[in-house]
Image (cartoon, grey):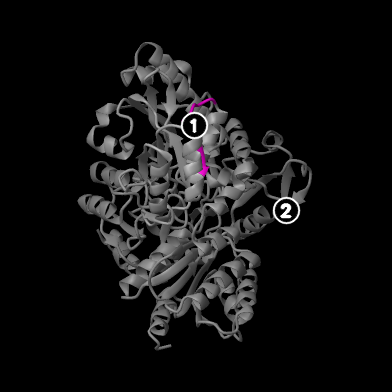
Amino acid sequence: MRLYEYEGKELFRKHGIATPTGILAKTESAVREAAVQIGREVVVKAQVLAGGRGKAGGIRTARNPEEAAAIARELLDSEIQGLNVSRLLIEEKLDIAGELYLGITVDDSKAAIAAMVSAEGGIEIEELARKHPEKIASRLIDPFHGLRTYQAIDLLLQAGAKGEHLVSASNMLSRLYDVFSHYDARFAEINPLVVTGEGAMVAADARLEIDDHSLFRHPELRDLRIEHIENQWERAGVKAGVNYVDLEGSIAVMANGAGLTMAVMDMIKHDGASPACFVDTGGGLSPERMKNAVSLLLKKAQADPRIKVLLIMIRMMMSPPDAVAEGLMAAVNEVPERVPVIAVMRGRAPYENRARELLSNSGIRVHSSIEDGIKEAIAASRGQG
Amino acid sequence: MAILVNRDSRVMVQGITGKFGTQLSELMLDYGTKIVAGVTPGKGGRIHLGVPVYDSIHEAMKQHEIDATMVSVPAPFVRDAAFEAIDAGIPFLVIISDLVPLHDELKIKAYARGKNASYIGPNTPGIIIPGETSLGMMSDSAVMPGAVAVVSRSGTLSDEVASHLSEQGIGQSVVIGLGGDPVVGSRMIDILRLLKEDHATQGVLIVCEIGGTMEEETAEYIRTEFNKPVVAFLAGRTAPRGKVMGHAGAIIMGERGTAESKIRAFLKAGVPVASTLEEVPELARKLLIS
């Protein structure tokens, strides 16, 4: 779960990382009011969960409340990287004397935590890593001991920090590590950390992604996950405990397991058709999850006339056929006017036989070969069912 | 000969009395896996599915020698279950549980490194040596003994790929799932290092996904060090950029994790890549001829 900048900054402040004075606003008048309250030059920042906001015009300076209001008029309800802008963060404009980059992330290939520092704050780190890897100082961090003070100082020294700045910036890095560790983050990043004219260290931005699997340890953040999803079907998917993704074709696809789902969609494309959307339910299926996933897609198909057929591909490893069939029938029976449903049921021989038997009078076409199921789904999507 | 486990391996199941643990253990016992002990704190002294249950690994190991353990406990308890097994000196763990927090996975990894334990998972379908033993959920009817090793990042897709091979009469020396999460115990290279020395394996089929850099590093290893023919299947080659395809690992971010980059790396290493499941057996058959 990515956090909005203003949410990330709230967590930063709780852990002693200073942020600019800022107010969240959702309307033009609230933006004007915020600018009045701050009482000086402000920055109006679109809150979207995407990188490259600045380049896309989502971060602008206003000299007075009227200018701030005019910017708000332009930004609110506009789109940045395909995402709707509904929240703006109004912040005091900082007096910038220098900028640093601080980041803590998980390096998948090394299966370890990495801390990164650069004197080139403000530039996207991926771009910097590609063009000037020598400008990033990094090291791996032991997850049991955490980031030690001397390690933070070493990193900042490598990035060229000196004197008082060395100490205060390394403190910021230690606090960022605290945030990373405390909230089970996938990454935590301050880019840039601004050194003001008065020598203070202020986090001008906050990038934070929390690991979804850890949310049982962070009940205070759990609701944000649902709140952050704009697409109503994706939101319904998260509530149902499955993964829904919108695409642009005529076949709704459901499968259990990410690899299998992708393989099925590749095969549909290979045969010249396109998936409209998909649900990956994950490997093991209870009747309830099966029902939720199928009814989500049947409802989507009702709302979206492009969708002509639902193809379901279940590999029954730890999902007994009775559970799968029960969930499937319950969902189908709830929606009498529906697109054709084609199901491929695969697994141990007794499982396959049992599934076919249970679904024999359901009106659902059951196949035991993926290739056959896909062929029939494509035919049905072209009105040849 | 087989890698990691074989027909004589004495297996423990952590979480054996749970609903999932029970279902899984039943399937494994049916397959012939030698489950000698189960562990569930508070349930020590019982016999479950004919297997003695202990309150802790320490208690179990007073009575049994254990070669491998399967961890099948709810996500919040996985970290401690893994630490317990590693502390007890069990050399190989199969962590089946899914939804495990990333930071717990990082700690398990660091702990195992320090104590020289190896493991697969979390979020893995497990490992099966066809005709010998199974630790996990691979379907008995999907596999048959043979000489092709299948190493996969996926769960249900591994089972499906094995079925496609078996239906065409191509048997497997092992089918192993690494686990679908970004931080897992063994990466593809770790398994290929074992297969290099495995006399039962003539060639390797690797089942890959978009996202991450595991395929690229694997291709480089194959090109420079591996001694057996390899073919690949890659899922997600038509996936759009920036969309998470099912789990956090499978996402294309900018240039990172794209199908093109992986296919390029494989071709450079002389590894042919199948585009559909149907093509997999044809490619795999070539492993046995060469």
The answer to which of A373 and B174 lies nearer the viewer is A373
Badge 2 amino acid: Gly
In magenta segment, residue A17: yes
**Rendered residue at 61%/81% (across/down):** A357
Rendered image quadrant of residue A218? top right
Rendered image quadrant of residue A377? bottom left
User: What residue range appears in magenta?
Assistant: A16-25
**Rendered residue at 56%/69% (across/down):** A296
Kindly state the secondary structure of the residue where label 1 is placed: loop
The answer to which of A98 and A43 lies nearer the viewer is A43
Q: Which residue is mark 2?
A: B50
Q: Position of residue A65 (x, y in %)?
A: 43, 40
The answer to which of B262 and B203 lies nearer the viewer is B262
Q: Does residue A300 lie above or below A74 as drawn?
A: below
Tell me the tag on residue B234.
Answer: none
Q: Is residue A344 left or right of residue A136?
A: right
Q: Does residue B150 lie above or below A336 as drawn?
A: above
Rendered image quadrant of residue B81? top right
Q: Position of residue A200 (x, y in %)?
A: 43, 20
Badge 1 amino acid: Thr
Q: Residue furthest top?
A: A163
Q: Which residue is mark 1?
A: A21
Question: Does the magenta stretch mainly form a helix, a strand or a loop?
Answer: loop
- Cα separation between marks 1 and 2: 66 Å
The answer to which of A146 and A93 lies nearer the viewer is A93
Q: Position of residue A195 (x, y in %)?
A: 38, 22
Q: Position of residue A177 (x, y in %)?
A: 49, 28
Q: Residue furthest bottom?
A: A384
**Rendered residue at 31%/25% (across/down):** A119
The quarter of the rendered structure image containing the C terminus of chain A is bottom left
Q: Is residue A156 left or right of residue A241?
A: left
